Image (tube, rainbow, N blue to C red):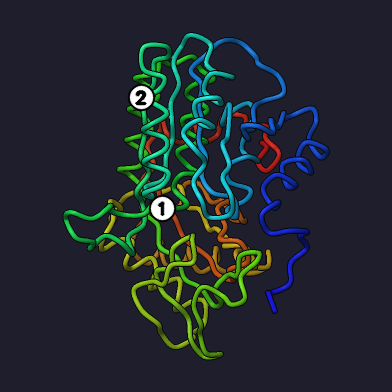
Amino acid sequence: MTTRHFVNEPEDVTREALEGLQLLYPDTIVCHADPAYVVRAGRGRPKVALVSGGGAGHEPLHAQFVGPGMLDAAVPGAVFSSPTALQVRAAVEAVETGHGALLIVKNYTGDMLNFYIAAELLDGDREVEIVVVDDDLATDDVADDGPGRRGTAAVFAVEKICGAAAERGRTLHEVAELGRRVVASSSTLSVALRAGTPPGHTRPSFDLAENEIEFGVGIHGERGRGTRPLAPVAELVDDLVEQLVEGGPIGTGDDVIAIVNGLGATHELEPAIATRELVRALDKRGIGHIRLLAGSFVTSFDMHGLSITLVRASDDLVELWDDPVRTPALTW
């Protein structure tokens, strides 16, 4: 027997969800069915176009971050499966206005392959640059000939900050370099109390005993650095921050934009409590929390877990972070 979800047929999840989003946000987004992609409802003035995407199951990423201040288009695949290169090309052609397109890609094999193929297909017709997000410290010790670090919740920061820069009229090269700078300034680690079970699957992607957690999980249900005993959230968050400081670009005296991210089945009380502990852990290490954000932004279907992303802050990044945004899942 499959795990129960509020779905019809598993293979129809992405299509039916897009149809639902169109009904919910008709003034904000337009969902195209074949090939599947999501664009802004209003074109606005010409500017650099931002396009991102990946498998479904990470909502609200990416489709619900389409709108002024963030993405111009999002390209969804099936659950935990990359969209096709033809989908990506169609989305770029729908939103690029002569100022070029920035493709924001999480570092997974399928996404990398199809977004790069799409860029090749567009070569000569549209100017395209690519920013690869590879922020997950749990995969920092992969083999030199492997795919490299996974892309996880820092993609949210890249989309927000680059989206603001594009709205300000910066060039494609400027926005792309800014995105690469955000990636280089970011690191993420995740922990899970329970793995997710995608629609149509009979078991979660990994098993844990009641007194166990998985440290360093990925957003496609990948196991992490190891299974550990369950501990209070204060200890877990302190350990996450310790490893983020040891292995990432953040150090004593830095200020950060900090994102506490629920992984799908995490109740809103939990990221709030984790934020409290995060501030204590940062203060203890002499790191300033110049901006804090908590919620579920980059999920792993129904995984019960959370991630912490730290972005080394500077005046210009904070200004862009604070710029207005209006999307289905993020508005300020």
| Residue 96 drawn above or below residue 54 | above
Residue 234 x %, y %: 49, 76
Q: From this viewpoint, which residue is outermost toward the left? A: 144
Residue 217 x %, y %: 43, 68
Residue 208 x %, y %: 50, 85
Residue 41 x %, y %: 72, 23
Image quarter hosting the C terminus? top right
Amino acid on which disc 2 is placed: Glu
Residue bearing mark 1: 310
Q: Secondary structure at mark 1?
A: strand
Amino acid on which disc 1 is placed: Leu
Residue bearing mark 2: 120
Q: Which of pointers 2 and 1 lies earlier in the amino acid sequence? A: 2
Question: Could you tell me which residue is drawn at 56 percent across and 26 percent down?
Answer: 91
Nearest the eye: 106 or 32: 32
Image quarter hosting the N terminus? bottom right
Label of residue 263 in the image: none
| Residue 67 drawn above or below residue 150 | above
Going by the image, does 129 lie left or right of 147?
right
State yes or no: discs 2 and 1 in contact (Cβ < 8 Å): no
